[in-house]
Image (spheres, helix red, strand yellow):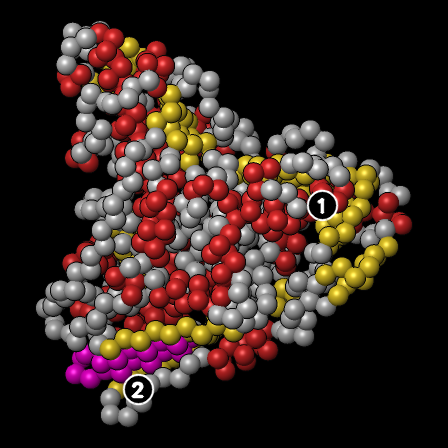
């Protein structure tokens, strides 16, 4: 294990460059080659092979990389006179550890200690077009080549400058430890060479990145560069900033989703202590005060008349009925073969990041400045500019680190609200959504209904049909800029086209199941939804993994061995075999306890999960052990990858067993963590082992990978332990709390 290192400066440094700093730009954009291997290796027990699905040929990550290729070379790396290396990363750090992984890539190429590298988050850069969107498990896949090439270009220029200073063959110079060392032992620090390196027109040495076989840091388990700052409170999130004049602000929000302000009486609230101003925008009435406590107290005294929301008359039962009616029919009748039919319901789920939606805005007559954690900052900047009536180049959007996201921060509701309030009030504001606001009016994973039919004969699955009906998932952020965002907002098939694209390029059946068809039909209910971790795969593949267990049972086969016989290739079988061996699949457990196993492949990566559950009290089940194997092609930071798998496991435990949102007459009932029953520490297993398989190719995606397999494993373990077939998730979904007033 690598010795943990901490870099205080590895978080938010200033976005401006030093006057004499050396900027290295990647000169040549990468070339992406996509190839599909259509050869299917037959396992020992022959199965009817399935043709590759769309996601086997071109997945969502490939789409995002292709879209970003024209600007992938526009990364900025600075070598300062202080001998520090600064990478300005055009992505959002929301806890997934991308700043650490990026710093590792830079340190590797330049041969410097990780502690010498700082990574800041770039302001919104409109010129990057599609290349500043954080999503689709795509960050490492998309920056792996460009970051290495940028750092290699910097190294080559520094070596060239040193050779010009000391003389001799530049090819015999070495960059290590933050210095360039000449063949005779003389050396110069990077900082002392930065001015000369900035003037180099053509490097005297090759600018290719190091061979991956020569990596000494990349691939080693490494602690986060911002860990110490996070645990000591030194790291600054949006509301930690001290922007001059920005006062605490909260909104009184409608009693139903997407209601709007009709009229309001603020006579009592204005007279309360600390209240500075009260203004109305379309989504609510904003109270600006000297403290958040005063703003919240005054907000509660506002008397507001509301226009109706968009789903005022709808509750869970109504939505479920609409979804069931929207599920498309099967094609294959189960007349002459054995079959498994199953239907599943998954509830709405809050993103529930620890940091609620928040933003700071300072809008003036001639310019505006915004601070917020944003995963699509370009479209945020462009939309805010339109809404407040300023040219785009007069709006500055600073991307702050976020305290969680899980897809929530693809949308910029808080930043837009803050800008509107600031403009109307004529002063800077520090807007915070309360936890109740974030649960009830924030974004959520759409509720879904699934119909599955599998037919089989003579030990072979002949057909597999999966029909998904979902409340519309909002993709109006587009690919992170205004053109595709506008396209997604078109009234006829705009958002639907994005939904189908995401579904087809992410969801796929990894098994040889004969003729496979998977179809999505979305119900256009105007609600506050967004991509939730793993988007469609968490529920679609989760449901499929449950069905795989039920097919195995009908065939009289062991769930692990059946999966192994129908998986398509050796890489898939390798992760499945690893968890079966390390997790002791098939061992004897007490009555009411059981194991569950599942597999998932997505974004050029694959994983398997094996859990043990104690369900002797079916109303209070607890996962007691988990074994996970993961193959991402080339892991950059195995420790960060382990954290991603643990996060996916915890999300699965929560959403399978207890966590969801009840919609009642146009509004979720849940308003706090005490009511939204996300897994607590006591609900998670103490015994978790994550096995990261050795590097065997280019990096795959990891952020969303860990959830679907864990969903299937937890559900299958519960089914085996209780002798039931769970069909509605979360399994234990009672309203065991008194909802907050509307």
Camera-nearest residue between 430 and 440: 430
Q: Give the quadrant of the C terminus.
A: bottom right
Query: In the image, is residue 663 above or below residue 740?
Result: below
Would you say residue 520 sits in the magenta stretch? no
Residue 320 image point, x, y percent:
54, 76
Q: Is residue 633 left or right of residue 444?
A: left
The residue that label 2 is drawn on is 332
SS assignment at label 1: helix
Q: Residue at x 67, y 75 (%)?
A: 313
Name the spot of residue 13 as percent of width and height, x first. 49, 27
- Residue to which mark 1 is pinned: 421
Question: Which label's residue is closer to the chain start, 2 or 1?
Answer: 2
- In the rendered image, is residue 724 in sight? no
Q: x, y (%) of residue 416? A: 63, 48
Number of dots carrying numbers: 2
Q: Quadrant of residue 167?
A: top left
Q: Image quarter for residue 463?
A: bottom left
Pick whichever, 503 or 566, lies toward us. 503
Whether residue 151 is visible: yes
Which residue is found at the position 66% from the left and 46% from the top? 389
Question: What is the residue that sits farthest to the bottom in this orientation?
Answer: 335
Image quarter where the N terminus lies is top left
Q: Give the range drawn in magenta.
A: 450-467
Tell me which corner region of the image, top left, top right, bottom left or bottom right, holds residue 590: bottom left
């Amino acid at each position: 294990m690598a010795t943990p290192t901490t870099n205080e400066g590895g978080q938010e440094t200033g976005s401006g460059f030093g006057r004499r700093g050396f900027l290295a730009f990647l000169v040549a954009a990468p070339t992406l080659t996509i190839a599909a291997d259509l050869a299917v290796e037959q396992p020992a027990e022959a199965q009817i092979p399935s043709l590759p699905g769309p996601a086997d040929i071109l997945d969502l990550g490939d789409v995002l990389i292709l879209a970003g290729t024209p600007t992938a070379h526009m990364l900025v790396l600075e070598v300062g006179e202080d001998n520090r290396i600064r990478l300005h990363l055009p992505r959002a750090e929301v806890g997934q550890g991308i700043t650490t992984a990026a710093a590792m890539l830079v340190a590797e190429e330049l041969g410097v200690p990780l502690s010498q590298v700082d990574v800041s988050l770039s302001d919104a850069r409109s010129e990057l077009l599609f290349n500043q969107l954080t999503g689709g498990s795509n960050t490492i896949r998309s920056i792996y080549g460009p970051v290495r090439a940028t750092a290699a270009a910097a190294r080559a220029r520094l070596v060239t400058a040193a050779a010009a200073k000391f003389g001799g063959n530049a090819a015999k110079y070495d960059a290590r430890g933050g210095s360039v060392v000449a063949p005779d032992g003389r050396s110069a620090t990077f900082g002392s060479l930065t001015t000369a390196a900035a003037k180099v027109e053509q490097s005297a040495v090759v600018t290719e990145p190091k061979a991956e076989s020569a990596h000494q840091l990349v691939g080693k388990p490494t602690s986060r560069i911002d860990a110490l700052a996070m645990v000591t409170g030194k790291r600054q999130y949006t509301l930690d900033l001290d922007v001059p004049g920005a006062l605490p602000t909260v909104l009184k929000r409608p009693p139903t989703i997407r209601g709007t302000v009709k009229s309001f009486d603020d006579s009592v609230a204005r007279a309360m202590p600390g209240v500075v101003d009260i203004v109305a925008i379309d989504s609510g009435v904003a109270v600006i005060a000297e403290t958040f406590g005063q703003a919240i107290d005054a907000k509660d005294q506002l008397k507001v008349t509301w226009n109706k929301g968009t789903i005022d008359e709808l509750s869970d039962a109504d939505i479920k009925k609409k979804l069931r009616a929207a599920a498309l029919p099967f094609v294959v009748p189960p007349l002459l073969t054995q079959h498994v039919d199953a239907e599943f319901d998954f509830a709405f789920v809050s993103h529930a990041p620890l940091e609620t939606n928040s933003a700071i805005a300072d809008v003036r007559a001639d310019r505006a400045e915004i601070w917020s954690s944003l995963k699509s900052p370009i479209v945020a900047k462009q939309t805010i500019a339109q809404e407040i009536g300023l040219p785009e180049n007069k709006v500055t959007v600073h991307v702050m680190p976020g305290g969680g996201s899980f897809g929530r921060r693809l949308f910029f509701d808080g930043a837009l609200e803050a800008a509107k309030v600031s403009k109307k009030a004529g002063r800077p504001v520090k807007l915070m959504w309360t936890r109740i606001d974030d649960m009830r009016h924030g974004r959520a994973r759409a509720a879904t209904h699934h119909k599955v039919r599998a037919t089989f004969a003579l030990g072979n699955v002949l057909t597999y049909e999966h029909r998904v009906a979902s409340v519309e998932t909002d993709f109006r952020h587009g690919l992170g800029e205004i053109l595709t965002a506008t396209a997604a907002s078109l009234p006829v098939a705009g958002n639907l086209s994005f939904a189908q694209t995401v579904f087809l390029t992410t969801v796929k059946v990894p098994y040889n199941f004969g003729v496979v068809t998977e179809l999505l039909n979305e119900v256009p209910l105007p609600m506050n939804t967004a991509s939730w971790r793993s988007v469609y795969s968490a529920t679609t593949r989760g449901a499929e993994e449950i069905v795989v267990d039920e097919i195995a049972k009908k065939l009289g086969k062991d769930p692990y061995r059946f999966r192994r016989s129908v998986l398509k290739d050796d890489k898939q079988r390798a992760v499945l075999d690893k968890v079966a061996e390390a997790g002791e699949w098939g061992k004897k457990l007490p009555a009411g306890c059981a194991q569950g196993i599942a597999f998932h492949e997505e974004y050029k990566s694959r994983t398997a999960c094996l859990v043990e559950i104690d369900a002797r009290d079916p109303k209070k089940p607890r996962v007691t052990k988990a074994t996970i194997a993961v193959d991402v092609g080339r892991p950059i930071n195995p420790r960060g990858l382990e954290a991603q798998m643990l996060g996916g496991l915890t999300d699965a435990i929560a959403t399978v067993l207890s966590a969801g949102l009840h919609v009642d007459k146009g509004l979720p009932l849940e308003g706090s963590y005490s009511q939204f029953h996300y897994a607590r520490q006591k609900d998670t297993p103490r015994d978790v082992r994550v096995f990261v398989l050795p590097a065997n190719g280019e990096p795959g995606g990891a952020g969303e990978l860990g959830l679907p397999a864990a969903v299937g494993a937890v559900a299958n373990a519960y089914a085996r332990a209780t002798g039931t077939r769970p069909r509605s998730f979360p399994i234990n979904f009672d309203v065991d709390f008194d909802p907050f007033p509307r």
